[in-house]
Amino acid sequence: MIEVAGLTVRFGGVTSLDDMSLTFESGTCGLIGPNGAGKTTFFNVLSGFVRPAAGTVRAFGDDLLGMVHFRRARWGLRRTFQTEQAIEQLSVFDNVALIHEHAKLSTTSRRKDVLDAIAFVGLTASPSAKVATLAAGQRRLVELARAVVGRPKLVLLDEPAAGLPDDETEHMASVIRQIPEQSAALTILVDHDMSLVSACCQTTAVLDFGRLIAVGPTAEVLRDERVMRAYLGTAEV
Ligand SMILES: Nc1ncnc2c1ncn2[C@@H]1O[C@H](COP(=O)(O)OP(=O)(O)OP(=O)(O)O)[C@@H](O)[C@H]1O
Ligand SMILES: [Mg+2]
C-alpha cells in the first residue's frame, strides 16, 4: 500500500505536483494524464531524484521520503524510465544483474533471481545476448526484467510499452498483470495507451497540470467527464 499526502513539487514558477493526495492499495494501479501532467515527476519523487516542497509518502508503512535515495532500491523500489536505461554493450543477464547488485541483494541468489526475472518477462533472446543486438520489443522486456528482479515491493513503470506494436503491447500487458503475483509488489503503471491501462489496472488515478482530478475503478475514471476534458485540453465545458 502507498499513501501519498499533500505532495507538492515546484520547479521555479511551475507547480508540477500540486497538493497530490492518493492511496493505492495493492495490485497494479494506473496513473494517467496528458503530457506534462506530472506523472514522471511523481515517479522522480518516489525514487528520490526530486525533493518535494511539501508532502509525505508512506509505502507499506515506511516513510519513503525519509529514506536516502540509494537505500530505496534496497528497500524494494524499482522503476523503468521513458528512455531505455539498459547498457547496449552488456548482455541481458549483466544488465539485470546490475540492478540486483545495486539493490544489494544476496549474491547467493543472484544468478537464479536474474534468470527468473528474464524468464518471467518472456524474453526469447538468450540471456547472454548483448542488448545492442535486440529488437525494440525485446529491449523493452529487458527494462521490465530490471524492474522486477529480486522481489521488489514497489514497481514504477513509466510508459513501458511506448512505441510497441499491438501484439507486443499485449504481451507486455500480460506480464505486467502477473507482477503482483510474482513478487507481491504494488505496481504503478504510467501510460498513454488506455487499452494497456485498462488491461492491467483495476484502479486508476488521473493527473492534470499537477492536480489529481480523478481516482477510482479504471472504467469509471475513463468515462469521467473531467478526465475526458483534460485529454481534450479544454478548460471548461
Ligand atoms: N527537472 C525539471 N525542471 C523543470 N521543470 C520540470 C522538471 N521536471 C519536470 N518539469 C516540468 O514539470 C511538469 C510535469 O512534467 P512531467 O515530466 O512530470 O510530466 P509527465 O506527466 O510525465 O508528461 P509526459 O506524459 O509527457 O511524460 C512539466 O511542465 C515539466 O516541464
Ligand atoms: Mg513522463
Image (cartoon, rainbow, N blue to C red):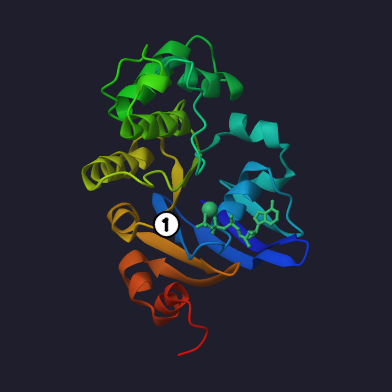
**Residue tagged by mark 1?**
30
Residue visible at 68% across and 31% down in the picture: 70
The x, y position of residue 178, in whole percent, is 31, 40
Residue 72: quarter of image: top right
Task: Examine the rendering and report whether any part of residue 104 can be seen.
Answer: no
Residue visible at 55% across and 34% down in the picture: 76
Residue visible at 51% across and 51% down in the picture: 1
Ligand 1 image-quadrant field? bottom right
Q: Is residue 60 above or below residue 6?
A: above
Q: Nearer the viewer, residue 52 or 90?
A: 90
Please state if 204 lies on the left or on the right of 172 as rendered.
Answer: right
Q: Is residue 214 above or below residue 9?
A: below
Residue 184: quarter of image: top left
Q: Secondary structure at mark 1?
A: strand
**Quadrant (top left, top right, bottom left, bottom right) of the C terminus:** bottom left
Residue visible at 39% across and 49% down in the picture: 27
The x, y position of residue 225, in whole percent, is 39, 81
Please state if 205 lies on the left or on the right of 101 as rendered.
Answer: left
The x, y position of residue 3, in whole percent, is 58, 57
Task: Examine the rendering and report whether any part of residue 177 can be seen.
Answer: yes
The x, y position of residue 23, in whole percent, is 53, 60
What amino acid type is highlighted by mark number 1?
Answer: Gly
Q: State yes or no: Cβ of the residue under disc 1 lies below 8 Å from any atom of ligand 1.
A: no
What residue occupies the far left of the structure in this picture? 167
What residue occupies the far bottom of the structure in this picture? 237
